Amino acid sequence: MHVNARFWDRLAPRYARMQVRDPDAYERKLAMTRAFLGPEAQVFEFGCGTGTTALKHARHAGHVTAIDCAPAMIGIARQKAAEAGIGNVEFRVGDLADMPDSPGAYDMVMAHNVLHLLPDRSGALARVRRMLKPGGVFVSSTACAAGAPRLFRWVAKAGHALGLLPLFNLLTADGLRAEIAAAGFEIVEDWRPEGGRAPVLFLIARKPA
């Protein structure tokens, strides 16, 4: 099992119990995303965790496929779907880099709290673009922590170097916008919650029709 999967597997039970830190910001992101959904929409999410966001959107879409590298996260997500009686979501254990190519299969691809954890963002963004239909959208919410306190930055780097923490790239908002534009997307929604404990950039970017 990949080191990241082991880390998130250990964290899964506590992660599932955590409350949303900023409920108002979360609800706004849900609403902004739903403006691009419809009853026939095919949605893919990678790094889905315990499935909360996938399940929130499933009622507004045709079908949602959601993956995570941690089996424990997927186990909790499947249980939540069963308890809620939501049948149009498929949760799978997997990593984006290992998924078979499915060109033009999805109307929306989502990546929440995951882009800053990827070792190859450019490769991931290229794959997302291939997966989307022309005119489809990529929805992301990403920690941009390059300006975080020095102690946080040191812990993130040292923890990863020692094999204790997953990779945490210290991104800037401008840098991430530039990466997504360079991957061939047009940014159509760009929002940063104010007053949150972590600097987060929420983007919706469209693949040209």
Image (cartoon, rainbow, N blue to C red):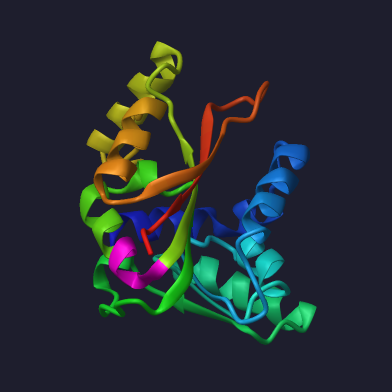
User: Is residue 1 at least partly visible in the picture?
Assistant: no
Where is residue 18 drawn, in percent x and y? Answer: 69, 48
Where is residue 147 drawn, in percent x and y? Answer: 42, 16
**Compared to 192, does 208 lie above or below?**
below
**Compared to 85, does 152 lie above or below?**
above
Q: Nearer the viewer, residue 73 or 98?
A: 98
The residue drawn where x is 38% and y is 64% is 209
Q: Nearer the viewer, residue 46 or 125?
A: 125
Residue placed furthest toward the bottom: 87
Q: Nearer the viewer, residue 189 or 47?
A: 189
Q: Is residue 161 left or right of residue 35?
A: left
Where is residue 205 drawn, in percent x and y? Answer: 44, 50
User: Is residue 24 at least partly visible in the picture?
Assistant: yes
**Compared to 71, does 158 lie above or below?**
above
The residue drawn where x is 77% and y is 79% is 83
Where is residue 124 drawn, in percent x and y? Answer: 28, 57
**Quarter of the image where the N terminus is located:** bottom left
The total of numbered circles placed on residues is: 0
Instruction: Specify start and end residues of the magenta stretch as a single range.
Output: 128-134
Residue placed furthest toward the front: 209
The residue drawn where x is 24% and y is 58% is 126
Q: Is residue 142 left or right of residue 33?
A: left
The residue drawn where x is 37% and y is 41% is 116
